[in-house]
Structures are given as C-alpha cells and as structure tokens.
C-alpha cells in the first residue's frame, strides 16, 4: 500500500516562498508519476504541477508557471514543489498524489494515491 505525506505548508505573506515536500512509502517510488493538486475553499481540486517517473517531463498549470517548480530526485524519496512569489490566490490545501506510470498525468481521476494535504495560507 502506498502512503503519501505532505509537509512544508504554513502561513506566509504575499511575495514569500515555500517548499512543499511529499514523502512516499510502500513501493518502489521511482516507478510512480507524481503530482500536486490544490483546493481552495469553495473550489474544486485543481492540478498545480506534475512530474513523470524519471523527472523528464513536467506540467504546470497556467496560474503557477514561472513561479512554481516541481522536482524529484529518484535517489531520494520526496517530490518537491518549490513556490515563489506567492499570492493570496495561492491559498489552498495542497495535496500530493501518485500513480504507477511512466507517463505524466494531469487529471485528478488518473491518480491512485493521495496524501492528506497541507495548508498554505498567503496573506496580503
């Protein structure tokens, strides 16, 4: 059974940076595509970024392009989401997800495993 745990969320001011981490346990983590999603109050859960099993392909939502970076080092477990120049619109619960595939996945329904989420709050 795959288990995902997010960390790194918190309360920051607009313009600040945060790095989220997603630890993976239970299987050979290098065989899994990974993604980050977020859900703001009253909104649907949206894809933020995704990365293929070997880090060769990445995806970013238009709202975060140029500010967020997803990365992984398969010699180590976690997948990271580095977030710069945060705005109040980035306030949400951020979830990491995993699916056993060598392809990049963007759609929420294609992910099999989910973490519990970490809150990111950006004050103006």
Image (cartoon, grey):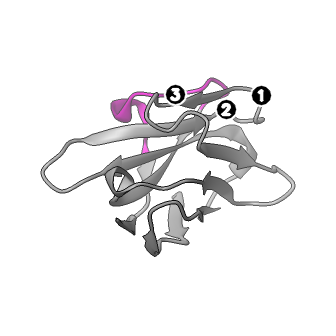
Proximity of marks 1 and 3: CB atoms separated by less than 8 Å: no
Q: Which residue is mark 3?
A: 105
Q: Which residue is mark 1?
A: 56
The picture quadrant where one finds residue 7 is bottom right
Q: Position of residue 72 (x, y in %)?
A: 74, 48
Q: Is residue 11 left or right of residue 31?
A: left
Q: Quadrant of the C terminus?
A: bottom left
Residue at x-position 41% and y-position 46%: 37
User: Which region is colored magenta?
Assistant: 101-112
Examine the structure image and report whether residue 111 is included in the region drawn in magenta: yes
Q: Which residue is mark 2?
A: 52
What numbered label is drawn on residue 119? none
Residue 63 seen anywhere in this rendered image of the structure: yes
- Choose between 3 and 121: the one closer to the eye: 121
Q: Residue furthest right?
A: 75
Residue at x-position 43% and y-position 34%: 63
Residue 25 seen anywhere in this rendered image of the structure: no
Proximity of marks 2 and 1: CB atoms separated by less than 8 Å: yes
**45 up-or-down from 115: above or below:** above
């Amino acid at each position: 059974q795959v288990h995902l745990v997010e960390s790194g969320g918190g309360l920051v001011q607009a313009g600040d940076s945060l790095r989220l981490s997603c630890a993976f346990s239970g299987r050979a983590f290098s065989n899994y595509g990974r993604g980050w999603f977020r859900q703001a109050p009253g909104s649907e859960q949206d894809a933020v970024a995704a990365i293929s099993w070997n880090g060769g392909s990445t995806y970013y939502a238009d709202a975060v392009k140029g500010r967020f970076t997803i990365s992984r080092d398969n010699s180590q477990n976690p997948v990271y989401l580095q977030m710069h120049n945060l705005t109040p619109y980035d306030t949400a619960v951020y979830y990491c997800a995993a699916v056993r595939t060598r392809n990049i996945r963007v759609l929420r329904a294609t992910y099999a495993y989910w973490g519990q989420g970490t809150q990111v709050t950006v004050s103006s």
